[in-house]
Image (cartoon, rainbow, N blue to C red):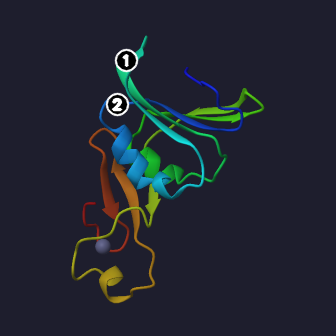
Amino acid sequence: MIIGDIVNGIVIDHIKVGQGEEIYHALELDKLDAMVIVLHNATSAAMGHKDVIKFDKIIDLDLDKLSYIAPGVTVSVIKGGEVVVSEELELPERLVNVVQCRNPRCITSVEQELAHEFRLANREKRVYRCIYCESEA
Ligand SMILES: [Zn+2]
């Protein structure tokens, strides 16, 4: 684990090479008022190579979004230079307002204020279905 000089912050580790940038934008880390480091192609004993993101601020990460985009990454919270929480993310059972239903006849297309909610239908194949119309995400 690379913590570097983060004293209080979050490290997202074990990201597949090339996915660091995608996560950076998906989590809107460009808007974060903090030092953000995206490490590309870091060497990893377990993976060979990986991307790592770290930033020196503890925020409420959108873990549903992150685990949907990049299941298998590890999120560690660092306080006072120590890792206080470390969690490997799995695909979430449900997604709320992470992806939009693309079925034009879905009720979510009509009722704009309705949450876009999907449930995991097949973990192995990463298939999510809209809870209203059963469309695939
Ligand atoms: Zn739908």
Q: Residue at x 40, y 46 (%)?
A: 23
The numbered disc on residue 99 is none
Residue 89 position within the rendered picture, expressed as x and y whole percent measured from the top left: 50, 38
- Residue 124: x and y in percent read 31, 38
How crowded pointer 2 is (Cα within 10 Å; few <14, some 14-19, many 20+) is rated as some
- Dividing the image into 4 quarters, which one contains the C terminus? bottom left
Relative height, residue 36 to residue 61 (above, below): above
Residue 10 drawn at (x, y percent) = 61, 39
Residue in the foreground of this view, choosing between 73 and 133? 73
Q: Position of residue 56 (x, y in %)?
A: 63, 41
User: Which residue is at the front of the view, 125 or 25?
Assistant: 25
| Contact? badges 2 and 1 (CB < 8 Å) | yes
Which image quadrant for residue 76? Answer: top right
Give 132 or 15, whichever is nearer the viewer.
15
Horizontal side of 86 relative to 112 (left or right) equals right
Whether residue 68 is situated above or below residue 78 in the rendered picture? below
Which residue is found at the position 29% from the left and 35% from the top?
Answer: 18
Ligand 1 image-quadrant field: bottom left
**Which residue bears the numbered disc 1?**
47
